[in-house]
Image (cartoon, rainbow, N blue to C red):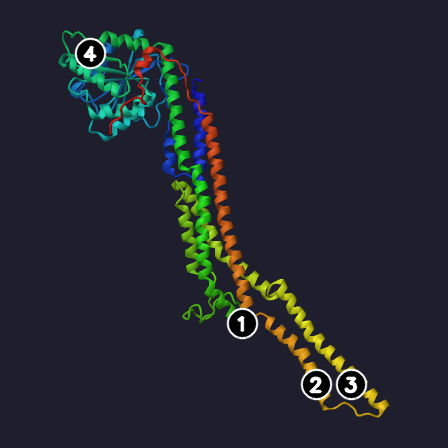
């Protein structure tokens, strides 16, 4: 489908909105988004009012002393461009166009004081706007910026060289940087000083730059009798390119290339968000590193657990807070005591585990987003573990031991009451029976042996279950330690879940950003299959086939 300017403008606006939202949410930096924001929507057609005709915009480009201005004057049939020592090569751009052509107000990036316009009334040249560009190899640092600011508004760049300077490094480097964006004609000017070998060498150089069959012409613009050259062919080519169909073709191609550049920049920004494979590595890595960190934390917190249990036996107000003597002897009276269960060492263990997991993040943006999400997890870790330890401690003290243990404890307690009562009842029944028998038979009453044996029976009936109950009762310190261990385990579970949830939230946000970008990319105009004439095909490079030099 042929890319249109309206489609490109819509895609550019959507991509910019997506990039700015991603920047606002911290996914992209301003430097990363800047190339997309700087991607201009400038085209040659935007130089002209809609009511005026759209000419071909042709610009002369080259180094100092190659005769660009002389060649323009010869093409124009008039000395409209200053040459020699008069030419302000580092200061201005010269425009030459028909008087019926009305330019729009130039963009702010174009210094008005550096643009000089000359008008003509020649109807034969009505379809061409000529531009004489500053010398690209000028020592003025802003000269290159001026040339680059005009490039998006140019249809055809006429790259002018001389036999001595056709391998000019600055001009050739810019050609390779900007080659895909324009149609190119190549002219070796001052050919009266040239040699056929130079023509073939330059042609080979252009082929290395991606031009399979470059349009390469020779001209001579010195005063006097002109040398035989290709000037007439150059003039005919310019006139044929000014045909409305070719101008439209070049315009569509410029929009197509901008669409491709937009897609490339957008894909580059998406790549900065991180890859899908990184998320699988993050999930796997977190499970592995936290398992190691958990073992270390549980072992390292064993001493604080025992210390807190002993503090509880001493009936401290808050057993989870270390006393002044145990925490920091130098701590002033009245300041809050540090938590024994989550001190700097424990926080460092969690931070190290998170840092090891973050090694799997494959982009700075993903790393920054995850770090921001984990900051809250790390800040809450101590409170989570502390609250779980308090809860489990209270539950352990309220219900010491397990269910079977508590059942035995209850049975021995009941037995310690019922067995002595049963023994007393048995002894009482024996005493009453003996008393009755003695009264009837006038026999002797119970003796000392009965009293001793009865007392021993009652004592044994009470002592045995009481002793068992006493031995089955866990110590307060041991119950507290068991509860705290359960609390630490539950707290570490919550911390692991908190971090995993933070990863899931960032991943969902990443997925949303990437999916939106993919939808934008699928709707971007690519311009594939756009027909080109044979002449236009010769004037544009195939940069994928170009041999790039370091």
Q: Residues within 10 Å of mark 4 (few under 14, many from 20)?
A: many
The label on residue 313 is: 1
Q: Secondary structure at mark 2?
A: helix
Q: Nearer the viewer, mark 4 or mark 1?
A: 1
Mark 3 vs 1, N-terminal side: 1
Mark 1 vs 2, N-terminal side: 1
As displayed, is residue 126 above or below residue 287? above
Mark 2 vs 3, N-terminal side: 3
The label on residue 219 is: 4
Which residue position holds label 2?
453
As displayed, is residue 335 above or below residue 16? below
How far is mark 3 from mark 4, CA to CA? 146 Å
Q: Residues within 10 Å of mark 1 (few under 14, many from 20)?
A: some
Q: Residues within 10 Å of mark 3 (few under 14, many from 20)?
A: some
Name the side, left or right, on which 538 lies relative to 393.
Answer: left
Mark 4 vs 1, N-terminal side: 4
How far is mark 1 from mark 2, CA to CA? 41 Å
């Amino acid at each position: 489908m042929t890319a249109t300017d309206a489609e490109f403008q819509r895609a550019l606006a959507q991509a910019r909105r997506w990039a700015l939202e991603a920047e606002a949410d911290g996914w992209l930096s301003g430097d990363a988004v800047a190339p997309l924001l700087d991607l201009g929507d400038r085209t040659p057609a935007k130089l002209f009012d809609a009511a005026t005709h759209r000419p071909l915009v042709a610009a002369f480009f080259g180094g100092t002393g190659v005769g660009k201005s002389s060649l323009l004057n010869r093409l124009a049939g008039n000395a409209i461009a200053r040459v020699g020592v008069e030419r302000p090569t580092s200061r201005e751009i010269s425009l030459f166009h028909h008087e019926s052509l009305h330019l729009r107000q130039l963009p702010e990036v174009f210094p008005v004081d550096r643009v000089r316009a000359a008008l003509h009334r020649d109807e034969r040249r009505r379809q061409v706007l000529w531009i004489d560009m500053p010398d690209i190899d000028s020592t003025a640092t802003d000269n290159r910026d001026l040339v680059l600011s005009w490039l998006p508004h140019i249809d055809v760049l006429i790259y002018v060289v001389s036999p001595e300077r056709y391998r000019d490094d600055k001009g050739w480097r810019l050609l390779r940087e900007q080659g895909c964006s324009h149609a190119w004609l190549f002219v070796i000017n001052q050919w009266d000083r040239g040699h056929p070998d130079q023509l073939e060498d330059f042609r080979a150089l252009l082929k290395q730059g991606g031009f399979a069959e470059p349009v390469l012409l020779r001209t001579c613009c010195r005063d006097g009798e002109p040398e035989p050259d290709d000037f007439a062919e150059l003039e005919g080519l310019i006139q044929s390119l000014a045909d409305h169909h070719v101008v439209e073709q070049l315009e569509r191609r410029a929009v197509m290339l901008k669409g491709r550049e937009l897609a490339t920049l957008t894909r580059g920004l998406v790549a900065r968000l991180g890859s899908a494979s990184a998320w699988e590595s993050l999930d796997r890595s977190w499970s592995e590193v936290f398992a190691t960190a958990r073992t270390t934390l549980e072992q390292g917190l064993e001493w604080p657990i025992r210390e807190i249990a002993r503090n509880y036996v001493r009936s401290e107000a808050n057993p989870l807070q270390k006393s002044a003597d145990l925490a920091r002897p130098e701590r002033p009276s009245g300041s809050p005591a540090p938590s024994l269960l989550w001190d700097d060492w424990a926080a460092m263990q969690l931070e190290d585990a998170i840092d090891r997991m973050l090694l799997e993040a494959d982009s700075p943006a993903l790393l920054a987003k995850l770090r921001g999400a984990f900051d809250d997890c790390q800040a809450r870790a101590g409170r989570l573990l502390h609250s779980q330890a308090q809860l489990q401690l209270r539950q352990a003290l309220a219900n010491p031991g397990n269910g079977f243990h508590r059942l035995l404890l209850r049975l021995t307690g009941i037995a310690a009451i019922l067995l002595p009562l049963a023994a007393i009842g048995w002894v009482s029944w024996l005493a009453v029976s003996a008393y009755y028998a003695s009264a009837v038979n006038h026999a002797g009453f119970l003796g000392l042996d009965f009293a001793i044996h009865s007392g021993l029976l009652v004592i044994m009936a009470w002592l045995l279950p009481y002793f068992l109950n006493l031995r089955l009762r866990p110590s307060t310190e041991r119950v507290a330690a068991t509860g705290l261990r359960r609390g630490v385990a539950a707290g570490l579970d919550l911390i692991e879940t908190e971090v995993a949830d933070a990863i899931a939230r960032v991943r969902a946000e990443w997925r949303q950003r990437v999916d939106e970008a993919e939808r934008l990319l699928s709707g971007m105009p690519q311009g594939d299959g756009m027909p080109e004439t044979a002449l236009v095909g010769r004037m544009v490079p195939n940069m994928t086939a170009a041999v790039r030099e370091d």
